[in-house]
Amino acid sequence: MSLDFKPDLGDFFKEETFREDFTFKNSPASIARFPFPFDRDEYMYSVNMEPHVPGRPGSVFEKTFDVDEHYVSEMIDRAKVLAEDPLRCQSLPHMTLAGWDLLELIMDSNARDYPQWFSLHKNGNQWHWINRPLGIDQKFTFLDESTLPYGPMEYITRQTQGDFSLQDERDANLWMDAGMITTQADWSLDFDVGMNFMEWHAPVPLAHEKQIFDRALKFLLKLQNGSPVRRFNWTMTVNPLLDTAPETYPKWGPTKATLTQENLGHKQHLRVELQALFRLPRSNAIAFSIRAYLGKFEELVTMPKWGRRLHRVLRDIHPDIAAYKGFARNQPAMVEWLAKYDDGKPTSPGWWPTPE
Amino acid sequence: MSKTIFPQSIKSRPVYATLEPRPGKAHVVIADGEGADALGDLLDKAPDRAGMLAALHILYTPGPNGTDLWAKVQGFGAAQSYRAPTIPAMLPRLSKVVSEAHMGTQFYLTGTEGLMGQAEREIMMTGLPFDAVQKEHRGSTLRRVQCVHCKGITENVAMDPFACSHCGLNLFVRDHYSRRIAAFQGVNIDAEDPGIVPATVERFK
């Protein structure tokens, strides 16, 4: 396929693949900033939301939207996914204004946070956007769809790492009425688009009984513009495959049966989602960003605390959660592999990789 | 409460009550199979049965289990009674009725989930208010299932797992329901271990 942008990797961005030969890996600097999601030696569902405010410098929390060494290659992968299946990006007709809100949020944030890569010049509604890593230089009229090559949500999310969904608010509920979903942990936008908050979470085990979704929805309905929030989610993925879609499950499902103790450290990835929620100013919709980070087991255990903790979390996890997240069949092999990195010493609280 | 006993299920599954007569300038009943009985109960409850019948348009089709109560439906003597041989054959007329409905028209959907889901989808697309639509499940619990892989819809699924009628993959019926598609989700059951398919069981009747 041909790309409609001209990438310039410079000396920061890496050329790598998330399919076929799977050349993706993390540099040592990227491992050191990996968002390890376990702040203790056990895991259970919780609402676990906190304000999305600038965090520790160099961490994935530092900026509103984290742009890392995988940016250009992830955008090439997204373009390939969309060429193969355009249904991965959908926006119901009433969501265009929310798309413009999202475009503005991302352009404003990235031009402010990464002036070396992104520029935005505004003269009234005449905007000029420059994205240097992707070689894009676009003049357009804000709120005029005819001046962009795609709808506003699709245009900006083809240039932004992570999946995005846009939630309309009505009848005291949130309705997932638009999304760009190509790096998903096995859920289908095409099936879920148009559902409300309870409907799209319906298949999740245990959490309904704990009232987690009722409380989360109440919390989100109060979300204010300018005060975004964030949380972690996680799962497991064999091979650095960003696009684990249900649509293509027959293609990637068989890879779950290929793990051995010899290849597990390289092939098995902890997949962490840094999820952030933003109330949008014009549409009153809520933008949900789901940024996936992949870490190979062999990369994660270079941090001794993470090796110990990951072993304990996976060893003791509730079987329903392992089944829902799709790694029950490989859980014993993962625990066996990780046991070598757990000497039984206590771990410090929190997720930062304390040096030893 | 629903007169159909469903197994304990999920949050995205629609919840069905019983139909209650509501004041309206026009009434539209969309029913299949045993839904004719729910229509009978509805009329029995109507404070002004003759008035309701004079403003009533019935669209009826036999159920997926073969139940055909058309004679009973005709016997109600509504202003308009229509029988379609199948749901797909009913949809063009339904679409016109829905698009021409005025505010104040009451919709009553009754019968199988497939019938109610597809009728509700037509009504949703017009933007009519939700509170003008009531649903009551009667009869078959056969499911309408969309294959998440090829997107084809298989009607009247009884067995789980089953072979997709479009692409042939072995699918299990996930308890995940989309009102927009009016279908449950079917997911390949032997993706990780091709050829290893559990014994099929009759889950829906």
Image (cartoon, rainbow, N blue to C red):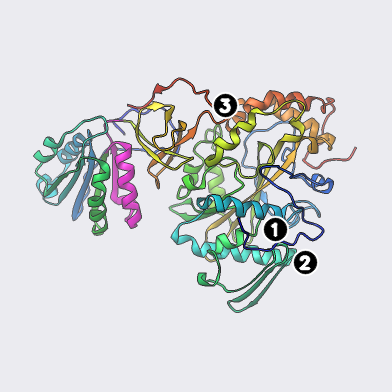
Q: Residues within 10 Å of mark 2 (few under 14, many from 20)?
A: few
The residue wearing badge 2 is A116
Q: Position of residue B160 (x, y in %)?
A: 42, 26
**Residue farthest along the right direction in this orientation:** A356
Taking the spot 75% from the left edge, 64% from the top edge, the residue there is A114
Q: Is residue B159 above or below residue A27?
A: above
Earlier sequence position, callout 2 versus callout 1: 1
Check disc 1 and give the amino acid type: Thr
Q: Nearer the viewer, mark 2 or mark 1?
A: 2
Q: Quadrant of the C terminus of chain A?
A: top right
Q: Indicate the chain on which mark 2 is placed.
A: A
Does residue A280 appear anywhere in the picture?
no
Q: Position of residue B14 (x, y in %)?
A: 38, 39
Q: A263 or A100, which is in the foreground?
A: A263
Q: Quadrant of residue A44?
A: top right
The residue wearing badge 1 is A64
Q: Quadrant of the N terminus of chain A?
A: bottom right
The answer to whether marks 3 and 1 sit on the same chain is no
Q: Position of residue B59 (x, y in %)?
A: 20, 45
Q: Quadrant of residue A129?
A: bottom right
- Residue B85, which numbered label? none
